[in-house]
Image (cartoon, rainbow, N blue to C red):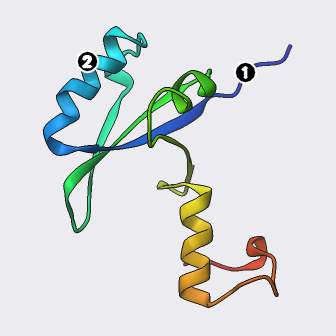
Amino acid sequence: MLTKKGVIIGSFISKDKVLSFLELLKYKFGVDLSKVYIYTISKNYKEFLVTFKTYNKDKFIKKLHGSTIMHVKNGCLFSINALNRLIEIEYNVKEEKPYNEVEID
């Protein structure tokens, strides 16, 4: 039997709008708020990172502006776009080497 694999949705939300965002998740999308996580972001004093798991990514990605699929590895949250950008900046890698061959500490 195939099981659906859930994805983590991440949204950067202004600190003064986080409560209204949580209400939106609860009442419009039916998200269980006990499954929502809010993270502070180092050196970002204006936003929180709000994450939750879903089995229907399209429902959220299309309707929550600025939301993206997040990944977790060794306790670290990241998006593929952010990881690719980090590789470009830190290692000055362009197209000579596939990104999946670059080691990140």
Front position in the image: 82 or 52: 82
Q: Would you place residue 92 above or below residue 24 in this image?
A: below
Q: Nearer the viewer, mark 2 or mark 1?
A: 2
Q: Mark 2 or mark 1, which has the lower sequence index?
A: 1
Q: Position of residue 85 (x, y in %)?
A: 57, 72
**Quadrant the N terminus occupies:** top right
In the picture of the structure, the residue carrying the numbered disc 1 is 4
Q: Position of residue 48 (x, y in %)?
A: 26, 47
Q: Residue at 62% across / 21% down in the picture?
A: 56
**Quadrant the C terminus occupies:** bottom right
The residue furthest right is 1
- Kind of residue at disc 2: Glu
In the picture of the structure, the residue carrying the numbered disc 2 is 23
How would you rate the neighbour count of disc 2 (Cα within 10 Å): few for under 14, some for 14-19, many for 20 or more?
Answer: some
**Contact? badges 2 and 1 (CB < 8 Å):** no
User: Is 33 positioned to the left or the right of 92 in the image?
Assistant: left
- Kind of residue at disc 1: Lys
Q: Would you place residue 94 above or below residue 56 in this image?
A: below
Q: Secondary structure at mark 2?
A: helix
The answer to which image quadrant residue 18 occupies is top left
Q: Would you place residue 18 above or below residue 33 in this image?
A: below
